[in-house]
Amino acid sequence: MTKPSILTTDLQAHIAKAIEAAGGWLGFDQFMALALYTPGLGYYANDSRKFGLMPAGVKGGGSDFVTAPELSPRFGQTLARQVAQALAATGTSEVWEFGAGSGALALQVLDALGPQLTRYTIVDLSGSLRERQRERLAAHGDRVRWATELPPQLRGVVLGNEVLDAMPVKLLARVNGVWHERGVVLHEGQLTYADQLTELRPPLEVPGSYDYLTEIHPQAEGFMRTLADKLEAGAAFLLDYGFPEHEYYHPQRNMGTVMCHRGHLSDADALADVGEKDLTAHVNFTGVALAGQEAGLQVLGYTSQGRFLLNCGLLDGMEAASLAERSMVQKLVNEHEMGELFKVIAFGAKGQPAWTPLGFAAGDRCHTL
Ligand SMILES: C[S@@+](CC[C@H](N)C(=O)[O-])C[C@H]1O[C@@H](n2cnc3c(N)ncnc32)[C@H](O)[C@@H]1O
């Protein structure tokens, strides 16, 4: 029996056209870019709520996932201490935030730093989030602005929380001992995976010949090269979930890391309900560090989010916090929540004197990259 066509949404029809235009096969990275960022239709381009504490059906709910600045304002207030030190160390006075989501982190940093921050620029691929950010940040007036493209040179502290994981990845599948690139085709009216032979390989050899699925991250690495090229003075702090490459390409991680998030549930079926759920992959921090370093940035530190936030003084004044506040702060640092899977990596602009950011004062893990 022929399966019924599932191309019932405008986004699916748009992706089907892109597959046809590409000759019948679209790399997973191109599919992911369309699923997340097709203007007006992609997950980050539509009006759904996305960020928050609770799924639909619960009072105040309706979101798909929670990020650190949504959990507790102490996240941004603590990161602001790191930003203040970085501004002073690099003689800059601006923040550039990539992928600002609901504007929660921007608000926390702006409130915490006050007038010492002369400007806060948001760069986001999602135009639909801009209105939400504008409303939330209205009290900070002209100090906040939005950029649709980067200037030739950039001076300041760059922030990116959970941005690298939203950048499209290529899928590599070793099948019967032979490496393929996994892409998306239309088969009997359905979006389906199809593999084609490739010369591409993971950056680390995965021993054996058993079936193995993984990702490589050309877009995230390209982003680092662009940052290196533009950052004239300042530093960058990128926070996200992921691992160094020896953990990423571990022989036992044979199913890859691509995940979808909707209604605070996760699944691995990227081809179902396209545009209605977030689509992400973990970050290969070794690849990010090398791409930045080879393009001239200095790696200033790398550690877990838990360690970073504790070094920056997350717990100062917690004695006075309510139980509810304490439980949210715990989620930021507990190893079984965001404390260990999430990492922080920092870079300094080319040619600037090296300095040690507060967040890496104890427990730096650069040697594991
Ligand atoms: C998972 S959300 C994180 C939002 C927010 N930082 C937070 O922590 O709540 C990822 C965001 O990154 C944005 N994004 C992805 N790639 C980007 C890029 N190359 N430049 C700027 N923003 C990007 C997406 O549009 C989306 O708003």
Image: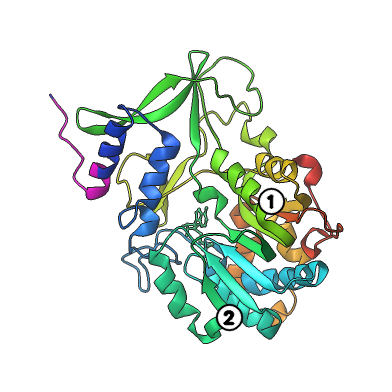
Assign the C terminus to one quadrant of the image. Answer: top right
Q: Where does the image place residue 207, in percent across and percent down from the top left?
A: 64, 18
Q: Are marks 2 and 1 in contact (CB under 8 Å)?
A: no
Q: Quadrant of residue 15?
A: top left
> With 178 as the anchor, is 55 left or right in this view?
left
Query: Callout 2: helix, strand or loop?
Result: helix
Q: Tell which of 317 and 247 is nearer to you.
A: 247
Number of residues whose C-alpha sits closer than 10 Å to that of mark 1, classed few (under 14), some (14–19) or many (20 or more): many
Q: Quadrant of residue 84?
A: bottom right
Number of residues whose C-alpha sits closer than 10 Å to that of mark 2, classed few (under 14), some (14–19) or many (20 or more): some
- Mark 2 or 1, nearer chain start: 2
Query: Callout 1: helix, strand or loop?
Result: helix
Magenta residues, start to end: 2-13
Q: Amino acid at mark 2?
A: Arg
Q: Is residue 44 magenta?
A: no
Q: Where does the image place residue 127, in percent across and percent down from the top left?
A: 40, 63
Q: Tell which of 195 and 368 is nearer to you.
A: 195
The label on residue 228 is: 1
Picture layout, residue 206 above or below residue 300: above
Q: Is residue 10 magenta?
A: yes
Q: Tell which of 49 and 317 is nearer to you.
A: 49
Q: Tell which of 295 and 114 is nearer to you.
A: 295
Q: Amino acid at mark 1?
A: Ala
Q: Where does the image place residue 305, in percent across and percent down from the top left?
A: 68, 57
The label on residue 143 is: 2
Looking at the image, which residue is at 70% across and 46% down?
292
Looking at the image, which residue is at 66% across and 84% down?
114
Residue 321 visible in this rendered orientation of the protein: no
Q: Main secondary structure of the magenta part?
A: loop
> With 270 as the anchor, is 299 left or right in this view?
right
Looking at the image, which residue is at 56% across and 38% down?
218
Task: Name the residue furthest front.
Answer: 152
